[in-house]
Structure formats: structure tokens, C-alpha cells
Amino acid sequence: MKVLFLTPFSPVPADFGGALRVFHILRQLARRHEVTVLGYGEPQHAAQLRREIPEVHNVRFLSHPWLARNRRVGQLLSTFSRHSFFQLSVVASGMQRAIDDALEREPFDVVHTEFSHMGPFELKTRALRVLDAHNVEYDNFRRMWETTKAPLRKGHYLLEYLKMRHDELALSRSQDALLATSERDAEIFGRDVPGVPRHVIPNGVDTAYFTPSADEAEEEPHSLVFTGMMAYVPNYDGIGWFLDEVLPLIESRVPGVKLYVVGKNPPESITSRATERVVVTGTVPDVRPFVHRSSVYIVPLRMGGGTRLKIAEALSMRKPIVTTRIGCEGIDLVDGESALLADSAPAFANAVVRLLGDAALRTRLAGAGEALAKSHYEWSVIGDRLEEVYRSLARTSGERHQRAR
């Protein structure tokens, strides 16, 4: 099949979760279909993408719109628009012309769109339309609105939630299929856009890259690690909650505990908390050494959506995990079998202390987690699931055309 693949950013370098998913979904599609990539990015990223995924048929990136390059100003201006900032940050006449040109040149079978805010463009084609939603973005903003205490930020999240809900549902109704990363997200779409087919294509992990440490002796006793793009609200909110509410409870019982917060662009509210025992790294070339070093991997998230790539990566690296239930949405973890699940501060602290003091439990959870990652979340396995969706759509489309004759 000939696929036009639309993305709001270049998937290389894949330096945060959304880009990593786009990269691997694209790679799986390009191995099976003739894929043309169109999106926003820099010229060098197009060349890098061709090197990383040589099977891609064609790549074209346009410069990011002005609003995307001036985020704070764009967010302010979006207050006076009926559309969300996310949508305004990608909609541009240049991209519409590029899409029109691509659709005029080639008879595509599928237009595959990454992220809902990349979807408002007019598609002058009879090709099938597939949206990879990543998250139910409006539900993500709803959670941020409900959780945030700061009045101005809370008001911004409420407006974005209402606008995003309108924009995202309007786009979803125009699709032939929606790809959700979790059963929960699929259920939300099923409730709000019941007439559109939904398929769960979870986030995954490259198990050949995220491998267990070859030297268990390098593990640092009583050490915890969290990884993620720290400018992302759910990540810094979760770590802020952990530092305020959970870590003091752990320190009272494990005085030598040490926390590594690993990820680019941490806000001042997190960097200001750095101490000898709370290491805030900022951008690092490779998160794996920090995960290898840790005794326990924590995911103290209180908001967000989709599936956490960080969970799949930690599982693949044989790290025992303590997570909230929101933090592991979309991953089939079982409390006490493949991870420890806890939502309140005392319960989360108790779970961490329990794991730090029980090497046998850490080993058992780590082994079950690694097996789960390889059997369910390896990207090649997910690619097979995505291919089944494409084949199903092709069959349905063929049957529709036969009936129309």
C-alpha cells in the first residue's frame, strides 16, 4: 500500500516518548509499505531519517510555524481563538499546499496521521484515513485541569481541555480508524465517537537496545530512578509530588536512599530541589546507565494519557517498578506479579521500602517484567498488530467499493 505519513515533528532524533513512538511506527510501516513522510522538521533531520529508516520512499520536512517556535506567545494568542494551542501550532498554509501537492502527485491508499492536532488539514483524496492518537489529548488536559492548583495554569488547562475536546472529536469523526495506545483511551473514544473503528496499538520497546545490565555489581544500593522528558507536565508534576509527599516517608525508614531524575528540560521547580541525594541530570546522551545503576524504577504519575514508554523500557531492562495506576495505563502490569502498584503517598512509599529491602522480590518482578516486554511490547510484535489493522481496513475498503459498483 502507498502511505502518506503526516507528523508534527521529525521522529529523529527520537529524544522523547512521542518521537520514539513515531519513529518505530514509521519504521514498521516502511518495512511493509511504500511510505512518504511529510511533516515539520529541519533539513538535516530529513537526511538523518533516510539513514535511520532507508526503506522510507520519500521525506519532506517544512520549517515549524511561527506559533510553534514561540510557544509562550502562541499559548497567549490561543486564548483568544476557538481552537487549541496544539492545533494552532501546526496549522499553516505551507503545510496544506505540501499535502495538496503530495496527493496530486501520487494515488495514496492511506493517509496516516500522527497526533490529533496534525489532523485538521483538508485531504483531497479518497484514501483511507488513520489517526494514531498517542493520547486522548482532551482527557489529558482534563486531568491536568483537575490536578493543578495554580489558578492561572488551571484556567489555561480548562480552556485547552474544552477546545481540544472540540477539535479532537471533530477530527476523529472523519477517520476510517483510530489507533489508541491503551484500552482506556479506546474506551473513551468509543464513548465519544462511537461510529469510528478503534484499535489498540500500544507503545513498545526495542528490547535489543534496552537490555539488562551485564554487571549486576554496578547497581547502587537504595537508589531510585525516574526517566522522562521533564518539560512534560505529567512528568514534573509526578516528580514534584514524589519529592514533597513520598520521598520524606521513604527517607525516614531508609536514610541513605538516593533518587536520580533523568530527562531533558527540567523546570526550575525540580532543579531547585537537587541535592547530593536528589540528582537532577537534565539532558543525558543515554538514560540506560542511570537505569542500570538503580535498584528500583519509579513512575509516580498523577495525570497523563496513552501508554508510558518508560514502563516498557524499564521492564525490558529487568528493573523492578513501583508505579501509580495512572502511570502504568496501557501496560498489562499485575500488582505483585510484574510490578508494585500504589496511588497514595504512604502506599507508594511502603512499596518502595519493601522492594529496597527484598532482593528476592526485586528479582522476581524483574524477571516477569522482562518476559512481558519481550512477548507483548517488542516493536516488531506491535508492527504485526498494526499490519493486521491495515489489512482489515484494506478488506473493508475493497468490500465497500464492490458494493458501490
Image (cartoon, rainbow, N blue to C red):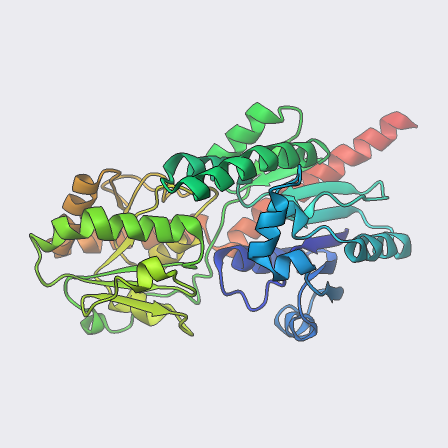
Task: Work out whether residue 342 or residue 243 is closer to the camera in this orientation and state it.
Answer: 243
State the residue in front, 297 or 345.
345
Residue 313 figure quarter: bottom left
Q: Is residue 336 above or below residue 260?
A: above
Residue 125 location (% of width, % of height): 85, 43
Q: Nearer the viewer, residue 345 or 275?
A: 275
Q: Residue at x 43, y 61 (%)?
A: 207
Q: Position of residue 180 (x, y in %)?
A: 55, 40
- Image side of residue 376 versus residue 196, left or right: left
Q: Which image quarter is the C terminus in?
A: top right
Count the labels in the image.
0
Residue drawn at the location 73% of the way across and 41% of the way down: 129
**Residue 317 in sight in this render:** no
Looking at the image, which residue is at 31% across and 53% down? 239
Q: Pick out the residue farthest to the right.
A: 405
Task: Inspect this view and state whether residue 167 appears.
Answer: yes
Residue 315 % position (x, y): 34, 55
Q: Tell me which residue sits at (66%, 65%) in the image.
A: 41
Q: Please provide percent x and percent y for residue 390.
A: 68, 43
Q: Quadrant of residue 194?
A: top right
Left or right: residue 225 versus residue 87 is left
Quick one: 256 or 88, which is closer to the camera?
88
Residue 85's place in the image compared with 220, above or below, is above
